[in-house]
Image (cartoon, rainbow, N blue to C red):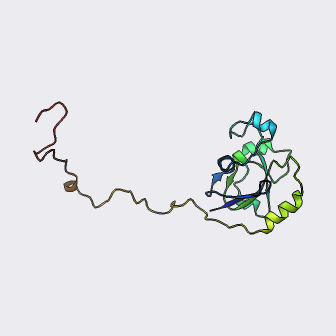
């Protein structure tokens, strides 16, 4: 599974390939929002621009989905590595700095350390996506095996309102 390394929080979190970055952060209790965002975020619709993250590293473009049209508009004056968590899908393991607009002590050292530690690549698809559904109906079943159940061994089943 891909791993999201949250630098500010010092945590590695697993997710499924293609999972929404904001959904993973919320599920894991990672705080994406500053005070303004806590008071008035849009809940992941891409309208408030308060779930900024900075994706670090050389492989950041391959690790995340491409910027959406919403992001292009909302982030037009922001650095290239910035993303809206609600619009970003994690494809491969990635290093992320939450709240990049707020300063962080030793940010350069912490980012360098996070990038230096190896990240597992993770699978490229959801678990079981290529496997055949085991609960599928058996193709070899015939009409003979699909007989109605008998009630108390008295022949055909009773219909509603019918007495036996």
Which residue appears at 13% of the width and 45% of the height? 152
91 displayed left or right of 134: right
The image quarter in which residue 92 lies: bottom right
Location of residue 40 in the rendering, given as x and y in whole percent from the top left corner:
75, 33
User: In which quadrant will I find the C terminus?
Assistant: top left
Number of callouts: 0
156 displayed left or right of 143: left
Location of residue 13 in the rendering, given as x and y in whole percent from the top left corner:
68, 57
Most distant residue in the top direction = 161
**Foreground residue among 76 and 3:** 3
User: In which quadrant will I find the N terminus?
Assistant: bottom right
**Foreground residue among 47 and 110:** 110
Which residue appears at 74% of the width and 69% of the height? 118
Location of residue 15 in the rendering, given as x and y in whole percent from the top left corner:
63, 57
63 displayed left or right of 78: left
- Compared to 33, does 61 lie above or below? below
Location of residue 63 in the rendering, given as x and y in whole percent from the top left corner:
71, 60
- Compared to 118, does 89 lie above or below? above
- Compared to 120, does 28 lie above or below? above
- Compared to 19, does 124 lie above or below? below
């Amino acid at each position: 599974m891909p791993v999201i390394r949250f630098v500010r929080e010092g945590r590695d979190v697993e997710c499924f390939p293609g999972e929404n970055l904001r959904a993973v952060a919320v599920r894991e209790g990672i705080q994406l929002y500053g005070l303004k965002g806590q008071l008035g975020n849009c809940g992941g619709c891409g309208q408030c621009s308060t779930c900024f993250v900075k994706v670090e590293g050389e492989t950041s473009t391959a690790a995340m989905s491409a910027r959406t049209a919403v992001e292009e508009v909302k982030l037009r004056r922001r650095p290239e590595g910035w993303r809206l968590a609600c619009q970003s899908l994690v494809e491969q393991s990635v290093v992320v700095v939450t709240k990049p607009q707020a300063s962080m002590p030793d940010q350069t050292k912490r980012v360098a350390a996070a990038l230096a530690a190896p990240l597992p690549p993770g699978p490229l698809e959801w678990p079981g996506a290529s496997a055949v559904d085991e609960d599928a109906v058996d193709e070899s079943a015939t009409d003979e095996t699909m007989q109605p159940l008998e009630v108390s061994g008295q022949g055909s089943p009773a219909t509603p309102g019918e007495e036996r």
